[in-house]
Amino acid sequence: MKNPWAHLAGLAAMSLIPVSFAHAQVAEPSLEQPSQIQVPENTGVIGFDSAIRSFGEVVQGETLRHSYLFLNNGSGPITLAQAFSQTSGVSVMISRAPVEAGAFGEVAVSVDTSDMVGDQYIRIRVNSDAYNAPSTLYLRAHVLPPEEVETENAGE
């Protein structure tokens, strides 16, 4: 692997600043040891079990519902300030109560597909006071018009 410090060492030498990078080493990423971030004490870190929910094919007019679960992986509470989608027909519910460290919370989403047809890729933004905020969740579905479903069922 090429040394990432080599470029900086060259720049330092050109500017005549006495800097030594002889002891600098960069660790190789490892799947065995997950990366960890340094988080200030008493700060929440939000971690969703899954950020994407795919419903596959659904019939136009169905109401889709899903709860995105998350864990507060930090050392302080998380308060969800707002969760929303700019897609028409999408409702997002959150709890205003703080989620303590080590506790679970949820973001509940309801989608009215009455005015949708075809592939839908819905983005939900979650604003909170977590260290790694904001979060983005996704919901996918392929909405079929009722007449298309009736035609498929009549042929069986």
Image: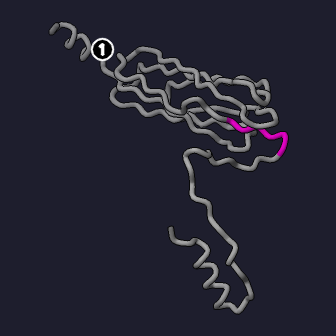
State the residue in front, 84 or 20.
20
The residue lying at 26 percent from left, 14 percent from top is 149
- Image coordinates of residue 143 in percent, x first then y, are 35, 23
Q: What residue occupies the far right of the structure in this picture?
A: 42
State the residue in front, 33 or 72.
33
Asked which colour scheme the image uses, the reply is one colour
Direction from residue 42 to residue 140 in the image, left or right: left
- Image coordinates of residue 12 in percent, x first then y, are 67, 85
State the residue in front, 74 or 119.
74
The residue lying at 70 percent from left, 73 percent from top is 23
Residue at numbered disc 1: 146
The residue lying at 70 percent from left, 24 percent from top is 104
Q: Is residue 4 magenta?
A: no
Q: Is residue 45 magenta?
A: yes
Crowding at mark 1 (Cα within 10 Å: few <14, some 14-19, many 20+): few
Direction from residue 98 to residue 82 in the image, left or right: left
* Magenta segment: 41-46
Q: Secondary structure at mark 1?
A: helix
User: Label 1 sits on what residue type?
Assistant: Pro
Q: What residue occupies the far left of the structure in this picture?
A: 155
The residue lying at 76 percent from left, 27 percent from top is 99
| Picture quadrant of residue 86 | top right
Q: Is residue 15 above or below residue 155?
A: below
- Image coordinates of residue 147 in percent, x first then y, are 25, 14
Query: Predominant secondary structure in magenta?
Result: loop
